[in-house]
Image (cartoon, coloured by chain):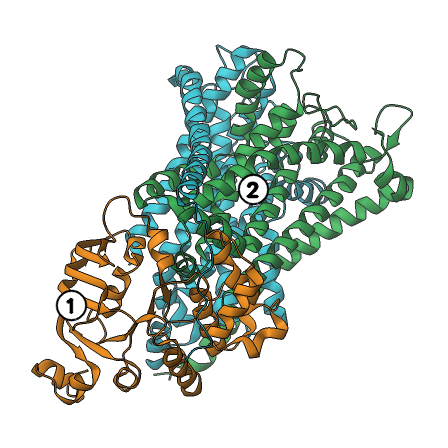
Chain colours: A orange, B cyan, C green
Amino acid sequence: MAPEAVLETVGLGVRYGETRVIEDISLTIPTRRVVAFIGPSGCGKSTLLRCFNRMNDLVPTARVTGRVLFRGRDLYAPGVEPADVRRAIGMVFQKPNPFPKSIFENIAFGLRINGFQDDIGDRVEASLRAAALWDEVSHRLDADALGLSAGQQQRLCIARALAVEPEVLLMDEPASALDPIATGRMEDLIGELRGDYTIVIVTHNMQQAARISDDTAFLYMGELVEYKETQRLFTNPEDERTEAYITGRRG
Amino acid sequence: MSPGAPRGGRFDTRLEARRRAGVRFMWLCRLAVAFGVASLVVLLVSLAADGLPALSFEFLTSYPSRFPERAGIRSAILGSAWMLALVAVMSFPLGVGAALYLEEYAPTNRFTTLLKTNIANLASVPSIVYGILGLAVFVRFLALERSLLAGAATLSLLVLPIVNIAAREAIRAVPDSLREAAYALGATRWQAIRHHVLPAAMPGILSGTILGLSRAGGETAPLLIIGALTFIAFDPLSPMDPFTALPIQIFNWTTDPRGEFHALAAGAIVVLLGVLLMMNAAAILIRNRFER
Amino acid sequence: MRKSEPGSASRVGERLIGALLFSSGALSIVATVGIVVVLLTESLGFFAEVSPVEFLAGTRWSPDLVPRSFGILPLVNGTLLVAGGAALIALPVGLATAIYLSEFASIRTKRTVKPALEILAGIPTVVYGYFAVTLVTPVLRTLFPGVGVFNAASAAIVVGIMILPMVSSLSEDALSAVPGSLREAAYGVGATRFEVATRIVVPAGLPGIAASFILAISRAIAETIVVTLAAGATPGMTLDLLQSVQTMTAYIVQVSLGDAPSGSIEYRTLFAVGLLLFLITLALNLLSQRMTTRFRESFR
C-alpha cells in the first residue's frame, strides 16, 4: 500500500485483565481512504478501533502493548494528552449518543471546550451541512436533540465529531441501531465524506463493507488475518478463514 | 463531493490549563471525601476515648442513679431488648404479610398502586410524627400509658414500611419459574408461597428486618414524645411496664450539665453502637451468604 | 373410610390467608389515615382557639408565658436556620463526594469510602446529639467567645454531617445512572475527565441530584434530637447561627417532656406544630419523588 499512512500500529496488543483481546496487530491506515474492519463478534475489531483514539484508557483493566502511530507520533508516548488525540481523531459510536441538550449545544460543546476562536454559529451550520442534516434541523436548532429520529441523531453525532476538525473519523458500527432507510442515508453520507477524511469503520455487515470501503481488514480471534483492497478481499481471499467468513460458512 | 468539510477554524485548546483545572477540581473533591471520612473517625475515636473507660461490669448491671459513679444501664439494656423483641414480633408478620399480599396476591389496579405509594410515603414520614401518633393513639386513647407495649407499637409503625419494602424486594427477586414449577405440581397459591417463595426470599426478608430493627433500636425521638424519659430503677417484667431504653438513657445523660454524666452517655453509646453494628453486620452476612 | 375432600377445606384456608395478608397490607392505609386524623382533630381544637392567620403569620411564640402568643414563625425560622446551615455543609460536600466516587475514584477507594459513609448513615441521631454537645459546641465556644452553651451553629454542623451520606449516596446513584455512552461521546470530542464530569455528567444527573438535595433538606427539617440537645429552646426570629434557637421539632419534644394534660391548649399546640412539620416534609418528599421518576424516565 503505497499512499501516505495516517495511522500505523506496530505489534499492537490489548488485554482486559487476563483476557487477551487482540494480539500483535501491525497495519497502516492510508490517508483519505475508507477502511473497514470486519470479523465475527468478539474478534477484537472494536477494541482495535478504540486504540486509535485511546478510548481503551477508559476501561480500568485494559492494558495496551505495542505502538500506535498517528502521523509518525506515538499516541501512547508519555506526555501525550488523550483529549488532544481525541480531537484530532473523532469517533462515532454504535448507538447514537447525543447529549441531552439542544441540537445547537450538542455541536457547540466540543467547540467550547476546545477553545474555538471563530463564530460558533457558523461552525455549527457548516458541521450540520457536512453531515447532511442542516436542511432537516435548521429551523429548530434549539430543540432537544433527543427528539430527533435515530438516523438524525446519528448524523448529529457525526456533525458533532466533524465540528472540531478531526483528520480521522472512527466509526464503530454506526448503522447497527438504524433501520434500512437510515442506514442507506448513513452510507451515502460516508460516501460524501470520503476524500475529506480518513475513515475507519467497524461493521458486522459484509455487504456494507463491500459497498463503502476502499480497503478491508478481516480480524479473527484477536488476530489480523487479511488486509487488502476491499474488491480483492471479497473476490479473491487468500486465507481460508477469510473465505469461510465472507462466504457465510462461519459467522 | 461534500459541501465542504468544516476546516481552517482557529482553536486555542489550552490543554495544560484544562489539565490543571481538572487536578484542582479533583483535589477539591478529595477534600470533600476526607471531610466525611474524618468526621466518622473523629466521632468514633472521641467516643472510644470517652466511653471505653466507663465500661465495666457494674456499669452494665447497675440501675441509673443520681450519683455518676453508681449509675449504670441495666434497665436501659433490658428495656431496649424488650423493645426490639416486641417490635420484631409485631413488624415481621405484618410487614411480610403486606409484602406477600402486594407481590403475590394484589391485582394491578389503582388501589394496589395507592398502597405502594402510601407505603413509600410512610417510609419518609419523620419519626417524631410517629411519636405524636403513638402519644395520641397508644398512650392516651388506648390508655397503654408509657408502657413497653406503647413504645413498641409506635416503633413498629415506623419500622413497618422498611421491613415491607425490603421483603417486597426479596420476594420480587424469586424467579417466576419457581412458582410455575409449584403450580404445575398442583400446589395452591399459598402452598407455592409457603414452600417455595418464602424460603427462597427469607434471607433477603431477614436481613431487611434486622436493618429495620437496628433502626428501631437507635430511635430516640418517638420514645421521647410518648413520654419515656423517666427514671427507671427496676427491671421491666411485662409489656405493660414502664421502661427506659439505651437511646433515652443516652439522651438523658447528655442533657445533664455535669460532665461526669457525659462519660456515662459515651459508655452507653459504645454499647448501643456495638449492638447496632453487630445487627447490621449480621444482616449483611445473611444477605451475602444466601444470595447467589 | 371417609373420603377426604381436599378442595373445600383448603379453599377456605386459602381465602382466609388471602384476607389476612390483605389486612396487613391495608394496615398501611390505616396508619396514614391515623396520622392525618390524629394531627387534624387535635389541630382543629387548637385552631378553634387560635386563628390560623395568627398561627402562620405571627412572629412571637410564647405558648405558656402571658401574654400568650402562638405565632409559629420563630419556630419555622429556627428550623430553617439549622436546616439551611446543615444544607450549606452537606449539599456541596455531598455532591463533591458523589462526583469523586462516581467519576474519579478507583474501585479500591470506593470500597473503603462507601462503607465508611454507610456507617455514618447508620449512626443513631442521639449519638450525633452527643457529638454536638460534647465536641462541636466546646470547639465553637473556644473559637468564638460569645457563643452560648446552646447555639444553632453546632446543631447545623452536626445535622450537616448527619445528612451528608444521604446526599452523597443518592447523588452518586444519580450520576452512575447517566449512561456511559454520554461520557464516551464527550471524551470523543476531546473533553478531559473534569469536563466530562462537570459539563456532561452532572447536568445530565441534575434532576436526580436535586431530588437527593430535597430529601436531605426534608430530613434536616425533621431532625429532632440533635437540635433539641444542641440548639436549645429559645424561639426567636434571629438569623445569627451563634444564638440559641428553637426548632419545630425541639418544641414538640419540650411539650411532651412537660406532661401537658389532654385537651389543654399546650397539648394541642404539639399537634398543630406536628401537622405543619408533617405537611412540609410530605411536600418535599413528594417533590423529590417526582423528580426521581422524571429522571429515570429521561434515560429510557
State the mark number for residue A245: none
What residue is shown at x 47% (from left), y 76% (from top)? Answer: B3
Q: Which residue is mark 2?
A: B152
User: Callout 2: few (<14), some (14-19), or many (20+) C-alpha neighbours within 10 Å?
Assistant: many
Q: Nearer the viewer, residue B38 or B154?
A: B38
| Residue A200 sits above or below residue C228 on the image | below
Q: Which residue is mark 1?
A: A222
Q: Quadrant of the N terminus of chain B?
A: bottom left
| Residue B196 sits above or below residue C177 on the image | below
| Residue C182 sits above or below residue B157 on the image | below
Please provide percent x and percent y for residue B118: 62, 59
Could you tell whether C160 is left or right of C243 in the image?
left
The residue type indicated by label 2 comes to: Ala
Badge 2 marks a residue whose secondary structure is: helix
Please provide percent x and percent y for residue C240: 72, 24
Image mark 2: chain: B
